[in-house]
Amino acid sequence: MATAETATRRRGRSEKKRLAILDAAQELFAAGGFDLTSVDAIAARADVSKRTVYDHFGDKETIHTTVVERVAEKLLGTVTSALDDELPSGCDLRSGLLGFVRRVATEAFPSSDYVEFRNLVNLGTARRRVPGSTRNKPKELFTERIERFAAEGAIRTDDPRRAAEHFIALTILLAQDTVDTTTTSAWEAIDSILVDGVDAFMRAYT
């Protein structure tokens, strides 16, 4: 019994250290980016040894990937719900796309988790697509929905993935890059961009 209790306590301490490392890494990566954040700094912020960091994660890139995917979970939930509610098969495409992108913007943009996600990805290491990873899943889910609409004939394209990228660039990314979301008039400006982006997409692909 004592041995089992000891093992349980050790696992508990190990998990606490793992979470402390991730919390410290998230703060440092979001503030300074991947390249400027050292394993030594992460260990010091987490109050663990450098060896403990390596024992849990192996290398700095694995830490970064784990941090990004942890933060991305909430965005994934938002995108999944918005796709299911706003873009079912047979929906009015313009209304569905506008409803979808408005849901993502209103639920994700104000979230500190989403801001952190953007900072972590933008300041991260190579931004390659990693199939199956949580950081890519929101985009992959949206792309799958565009592929379905293309197969049904609602969208005219030979390259649904490129069409999905165009939609995201015309709406979410453009709003992110041009609007200061902390201002009182932010939503009016964001919504104008979203409406214009959806209409541009419809003209190009329907």
Image: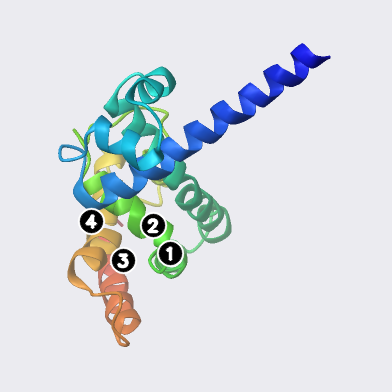
Q: Position of residue 87 (x, y in %)?
A: 50, 56
Work out how far the residue at label 2 is from the one at label 1, CA to CA, in angstroms: 5 Å
Mark 4 neighbour density, 10 Å: few (under 14) some (14–19) many (20 or more): some
Circle number at residue 114: 2
Residue 151 visible in rendering: no
Residue 76 visible in rendering: yes
Residue carrying label 3: 198
Q: Position of residue 95 (x, y in %)?
A: 45, 68
Instruction: Describe the element under mark 1 as helix, strand or loop.
Output: loop
* Colour style of the rendered protein structure: rainbow
Work out how far the residue at label 1 is from the one at label 4, CA to CA, in angstroms: 20 Å
Residue carrying label 4: 169
| Label 3–label 4 contact, CB within 8 A | no
| Label 2–label 1 contact, CB within 8 A | yes
* Nearest the eye: 117 or 199: 117
Task: Choose top left, top right, bottom left or bottom right for residue 2.
Answer: top right
Pick whichever of labels 3 and 4 is earlier in the sequence.
Answer: 4
Q: Residue at point 21% right, 39% down?
A: 37
